[in-house]
Image: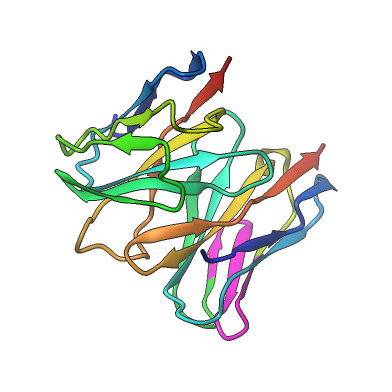
Amino acid sequence: DGGITQSPKYLFRKEGQNVTLSCEQNLNHDAMYWYRQDPGQGLRLIYYSQIVNDFQKGDIAEGYSVSREKKESFPLTVTSAQKNPTAFYLCASSPAGTSGSNTDTQYFGPGTRLTVL
Amino acid sequence: ILNVEQSPQSLHVQEGDSTNFTCSFPSSNFYALHWYRWETAKSPEALFVMTLNGDEKKKGRISATLNTKEGYSYLYIKGSQPEDSATYLCAFGEYGNKLVFGAGTILRVKS
């Protein structure tokens, strides 16, 4: 089955700790994205990557970091610098990266709900 | 940052009712408009991608129209069924292969 997996489904973190959210895809997609959802708001872009070993900041990158060492993997680290990390995090991918366009459909994972205690 | 607005925020209808919601977006520098359906406990799934003014797309009982000159898109559901209950998201395709999402319209269909 092709798709996007995110783990874990639920994650609890103490204040001051860094935590890494996993995102893996076997769709052979070039582009990958991380979004954050808060109640009453749309999905907001944290980081995106159009090709391996390259990524760009989205609208709310502060307090987050990513890596893209492999085409199929795009982990997101929520650092202690992120002031309000409790949220639902969605990972997505789309087929074409630098040659893609904004008509490309994005395919989403099931999400990770992060709660800071 | 672009602003994409959706209305209403939520909608409760009876089975068999037809319904529609609105997505408003900037009318300048338009590239594409996406609609997604997000059912509870599942991942968002693409419904339509629309690029041309006057575009109309249809999938079963769901259809969408696009007006890029005035910056809005309508999503219509004919004869709503309980399985249509979901959050419907629209997203503006921004330059550089990025999407800007609205907050969504939550639809609940009662049987």
Above or below — where is A77 with respect to A99?
above
Horizontal side of residue A1 vs A17, given as left or right: left
Q: Is residue A9 magenta?
A: no
Q: Quadrant of residue B51?
A: bottom left
Above or below — where is A36 with respect to A49?
above
Residue under the image location 47 percent in, 33 percent down: A82
Where residue B30 sits: x, y (%)? 46, 77
Where residue B110 sits: x, y (%)? 82, 38
Horizontal side of residue A89 vs A41, given as left or right: left
Is residue B72 in view? Answer: yes
- Of residues A113 and A1, which is closer to you in this image? A113
Residue under the image location 42 percent in, 42 percent down: A62
Horizontal side of residue B38 vs A3, given as left or right: right
Where residue A87 sits: x, y (%)? 56, 31
Q: Does the magenta stretch include residue B69?
A: yes
- Of residues A20 and B95, which is closer to you in this image? A20
Is residue B77 in view? Answer: no
The boundaries of the magenta stretch are B57-74
Residue under the image location 35 percent in, 29 percent down: A77
Above or below — where is B34 with respect to B86?
below
The quadrant of the rendering that contains the C terminus of chain A is top right
